[in-house]
Every structure is written in C-alpha cells, then in structure tokens.
Amino acid sequence: MQTPVPTAGQHAIPSYLQADHLGPWGIYLQQVERVTPYLGHLARWVETLKRPKRILIVDVPIEMDDGRIAHFEGYRVQHNLSRGPGKGGVRFHQDVTLSEVMALSAWMSVKNAAVNVPYGGAKGGIRVDPKTLSRGELERLTRRYTSEIGLLIGPTKDIPAPDVNTNGQIMSWMMDTYSMNVGATATGVVTGKPIDLGGSLGRVEATGRGVFTVGVEAAKLTGLPVQGARVAVQGFGNVGGTAGKLFADAGAKIVAVQDHTGSIHNASGLDVAALLSHVAERGGVGGFAGAEVMDSDDFWGVDCDILIPAALEGQITKDNAGRIKAKMVIEGANGPTTPEADDILNDKGVLVLPDVIANAGGVTVSYFEWVQDFSSFFWTEDEINARLVRIMQEAFAGVWQVAHEHKVSLRTATFIVACQRILHAREMRGLYP
Ligand code: GLU
C-alpha cells in the first residue's frame, strides 16, 4: 500500500519541531549581541530580550469546501510586554515558522520602543498559502485562529494588525470573532481595520509614508537630492507601492521594480500611477507594458541611488550585496538584509535605514487607530499624516545622533535607543514576585 505524501499545512511535521539555528531568530540574537556593549548597567537585564515572554502554538483545523478536514499551524508570540500591551501583525504565508514569528515579535518590541509608542512587541502567523484557499476557507481559518489565540489577545493585552497576506477584511473577521466571544463589539482588539469598523484614515499608506519620510530625512543629512534620484523597489504592494509613489511625486525616478510576478526596469523612470493600477488589476508587476523585463537576479545590480526592499526577509544576502549600486537602502520589509549582507553594505559605505525604524510608520498609525477607537473620536487624514511625519522625523533624528556618537550603524543605534527604553522599563517595574 502506498503511504500518502503529507502536504504542508495539513499533516507535515510541524515546523517548530525542526531545528532552525540560523533562521531569523538567530539573526535577531546576533543583533542583540551587537548592542549589549552599549547598554551600560541595563545589560544586567539583557537576557529578557533573548527570550520571548510567551509563545503560543495553536492547531487550526477547518473544514475545506470539499469536506476534508485540514489542520494548519498557527502562532502568536509575545516577545516583551514591559512597555505596554503586545502589538504586531499576523502573517499568512506558507513559509511561516516559529523562528520567524519569534524574530518578528522581537523586532516589533524594538520598533515600538524606537518610535516610542507605548507597546511591547508581538507577532502572529499561520503557515498557509492563502492563495490556495477559497474565501470561505480563508474566513473559517481566520476565525478559528482568532478564537485559538483568544487566550492572549485583547484591546489592553495584545493587538494584532495586518502583515504579509493579511488585510482589512481579515482584521474585520478577527475583530468580529473576538467580539462574538466576549459578547461586546471590541474595535480596539485589532488595528488596520476598514474605516467603517473603527479603522484609521492613512493606515493603509502609513508604512510606505514612513519609509518615504525617513528616506527624505536621511537624504537631507547625506546630501543626496531626492529630486531626480533613481529608486529601485522590491515588492509593490502596500509598502513598496506607496513609498514608490511618494518618491515619484517628490521628483524621484522609479527605475526598477521586482515582485513575485516579475522584475521590470525603465531607466527613464516608470509611470508609477499606471503601474499601481496594473498591480491592482493583475496582482503584480509582471506583464506591465511601460517597461522592459529583467532577470530577477539582475535587479540587485541595477543602477540606482536608493533601493527599497519591501517584500520578505532574507532578500539582500552575501551573494547579491556586493553588486548593489545604491547609496542608500531603506528597509520597508522586516528583516530583508542578512547580517553578512549588512556588513558588506556597511563596508561599501551604503547607508542602510533599518526596518526597526524605516517601516515603523505602520505601527505608529496603528497606535493612532487604537487611541481613536478607545476615545471614539476620529482624526482627519491631515492630522494623522502630520503626527506620523513628526514622530518618524524625531525618532530618526535621535537614532542618527546615537549612531554618530557611538560610531555604529543605524541598525545598532536603533537597537541602542530601543533596548535602553525596554530594559529601563523592565528595571523600573522590577521582578515579580
Ligand atoms: N505588520 C506591521 C509591522 O510589521 C504593522 C504592525 C502593527 O501595526 O501592529 O510593523
């Protein structure tokens, strides 16, 4: 008799049982090692940062449209709650692992502290390719997952938000499921909701706007004119698409774009508005008429001034970092640069604006959404954007100063600022009991 081959997400060996020492969590631990010498007396508490406070692994069974019962692995990790409730997105992706969710939750702790929003760090995920599910299956998966992590989440406990492959519709199902379980409409349990359900104006564009804001600040400080700058973007969704549009509106030229559907370039600058409509219609940049197709690996060596990785982690590696011609890399994605690549870029004099500050615009407007939900008083888009820009500019200026004071990279400087805030809170609170 033939043994049926297990498929991912159903009966395969759970990823958390597989050794993953060099995965994203390992990278995060290296980053903590680098910051430890700068923590002074707070280094006494550094072990706190090396262990997530809580890890919840859940089995998410759902009935598929054809009557089969499928099981998916879900996670919610609360890395640190010293400064406030857990905060961070939920991603649906076939490659999600515990190591990845742990690292992403830790980067949320750092990011939230770096921009000084009153949250700890958390992250969640389901190991699933949502493109293979029907809408009904996706809804059942989301609801069952929300119910399973209901032990941890809540408006004052841990507040999920969108991340890779999750959006306002998924947040609506999460909000509804949690609300049904507690018997009251609890809008503040998730952020990134549609406007009619207590969402915030400007939230969808917030991460891209933050990427643009820190990019402009760094360009001013290094004397790189944004007007006429050549920009290459990887990922043209929420983050890369918005950042690309804002750079183009400021007079930059978007010369190359890569996503999961293809890599395109146009040395005289792509028509960003047309490309955004093409992506909205076709789901990716592939097949766009106003550009030439390029080999996906050649994307990294494209002639440009600014490179914005805004897709997944682990994209800039020791194999392609040496070919990067950009003067500045702005990390729209979480963890797009491996530590070896980070060193190569640093040695080449490429300025890397790290994820933990560059993409913090999303969670900053999530914070505004949560505050608006609590007060049931909603702000105008201009107010939101102005507050976002102010927070990003101030946070970036602080990190820049620390980088120059200690002669360290902007990543290490952001970790210094953030880890000091987290560990100071930890110290002040003290150990219980
Ligand atoms: N998923 C986004 C991030 O990685 C946003 C998280 C949030 O808004 O809570 O920063």
Image (cartoon, rainbow, N blue to C red):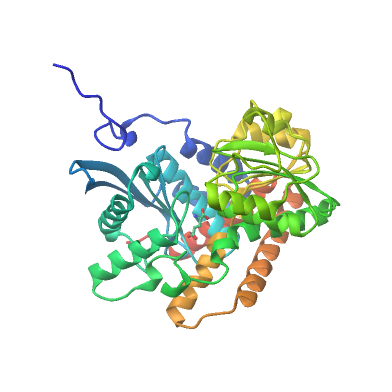
- Quarter of the figure with residue 180: bottom left
Extreme residue toward the front, this view? 289
The residue depicted at 17 percent of the width and 17 percent of the height is 2
Above or below, 284 against 110 in this view is above
Instruction: Pinpoint residue 4: horizontal percent, then vertical percent.
Output: 21, 24
Is 329 in front, or is 143? 143
Q: Does residue 159 appear anywhere in the picture? A: no
Instruction: Pinpoint residue 86: horizontal percent, then vertical percent.
Output: 42, 60
Is 132 in front, or is 322? 132
Rendered-image quadrant of the C terminus: bottom left
Instruction: Pinpoint residue 241: horizontal percent, then vertical percent.
Output: 62, 52
Q: How many marks?
A: 0
Q: Does residue 164 appear anywhere in the picture? A: yes
The residue depicted at 37 percent of the width and 65 percent of the height is 172
Extreme residue toward the top, this view? 1
Instruction: Pinpoint residue 167: horizontal percent, then vertical percent.
Output: 45, 57
The residue depicted at 28 percent of the width and 31 percent of the height is 13
Above or below, 249 against 125 in this view is below
Q: Is residue 318 left or right of residue 282?
A: right
Above or below, 247 against 260 in this view is below
Q: Is residue 99 left or right of residue 333?
A: left
Rendered-image quadrant of the N terminus: top left
Q: Is residue 159 left or right of residue 117?
A: left
Is 429 in front, or is 218? 218
